[in-house]
Image: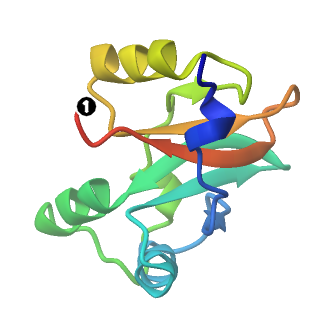
Amino acid sequence: MRRVADAMHTPSVVVEPSTTVQEASARMLDAHVHAAVVVDDGAVCGLATAARVSTALSEGYDASETPVGAIAEAEPTLVAPDDALAEAHQLMRSAGRTFAAVVGSKREPLGLLEDPEA
């Protein structure tokens, strides 16, 4: 059986809630990814996706002033590396989420799981 660890990507972009939307977005573009894991004190507390950034900008948020924590998913889908991949994808689809943060026992970011079908 495939596990989340078999399909996850190491998070190339990890930001703090106080990072501006502009900085988080620039880091995502530089890394060629569509999501950034938001951490507070080393624990995942949110997920900023390109879609959420786009929505925030269309709603008039100032990217250079707005902290990414203000627009990030406050309760992202969290999965563990040993979780069954099929179950993780099912959880993501039922929540309507394209991304899930892969976390360790202390909610530390280990990776990012993407399900383009979600």
Determine whether 36 is above or below 72 in the image: below
The residue at the far left in this view is 58
Q: Nearer the viewer, residue 95 or 40?
A: 95
Q: Residue furthest front?
A: 1
Q: Measured from the top left, where is residue 112 in percent x and y?
A: 57, 47
The kind of residue tagged 1 is Ala
Which quadrant is home to the C terminus? top left
Write the residue at 50% across / 47% down: 47
Q: Is residue 92 left or right of residue 4?
A: left
Secondary element under disc 1, as helix, strand or loop, is loop
Residue marked by disc 1: 118
In the displayed structure, does residue 37 sit left or right of residue 50? right
User: Residue at horizontal 37%, vertical 63%?
Assistant: 34
Q: Nearer the viewer, residue 39 or 35?
A: 35
Q: Residue at x 32, y 19 (%)?
A: 95
Left or right of residue 8, residue 71 in this image: left
The front one of 94 and 38 is 94
In front: 101, or 41? 101
The colour scheme used to paint the residues is rainbow
